């Protein structure tokens, strides 16, 4: 198990939290995606549960996203220009 105050994990304090919902074998799997706001190429994906309906998964994902993103400084966001997406 990793140390509690590991400097390698310190970026998680400033991470943006997103959710990912995908259907796998008839169940809707919910994952939290933590994106480093200083280096958007650094991600951490954690599965948090699976549900029988998409609506249940969406409700749970929204609740967990709000809980994980609580910060006294406000919700952290990644700059959209950090990724080079070709819009063609």
Image: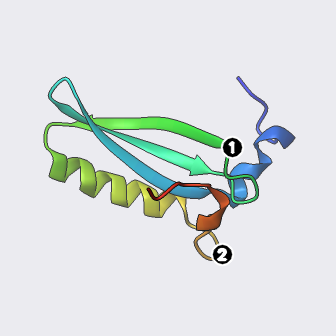
Task: Please tell me which residue is depicted at 62% across the width and 69% down the height of the picture.
Answer: 71
Task: Please tell me which residue is depicted at 79% across the width and 48% down the height of the picture.
Answer: 10
Q: Outermost residue toward the front?
A: 88
Rendered view: 30 above or below 80: above
Quadrant for residue 23, please give it. top left
Rendered view: 9 above or below 17: above
Q: What residue would you read off at disc 1?
A: 42
Q: What residue would you read off at disc 2?
A: 72
Residue 6 visible at all: no
Viewer-closest of 6 and 43: 43
| Disc 1 residue crowd, few under 14, some 14–19, many 20+, Cα 10 Å | few
Find residue 5 and name its label: none
Quadrant for residue 6, please give it. top right
Q: Outermost residue toward the right?
A: 7
Which mark is first along the chain, 2 or 1?
A: 1
Task: Please tell me which residue is depicted at 25% across the width and 47% down the height of the picture.
Answer: 57
Q: Where is residue 67 drawn, in percent x and y?
A: 47, 60
Q: Where is residue 63 drawn, in percent x and y?
A: 36, 59
Q: Nearer the viewer, mark 1 or mark 2?
A: 1
Marks 1 and 2, how far apart at CA: 23 Å
Q: Secondary structure at mark 2?
A: loop
Residue 81 visible at all: yes
Viewer-closest of 62 and 84: 84
């Amino acid at each position: 198990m990793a140390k509690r105050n590991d400097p390698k994990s310190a970026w998680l304090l400033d991470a943006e939290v997103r959710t990912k919902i995908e259907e796998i074998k008839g169940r809707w799997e919910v994952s939290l995606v933590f994106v480093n706001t200083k280096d958007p190429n650094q991600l951490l994906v954690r599965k948090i549960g699976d549900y029988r309906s998409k609506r249940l998964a969406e409700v749970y994902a929204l609740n967990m996203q709000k809980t994980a993103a609580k910060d006294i400084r406000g919700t952290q966001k990644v700059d959209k220009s950090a990724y080079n997406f070709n819009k063609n």
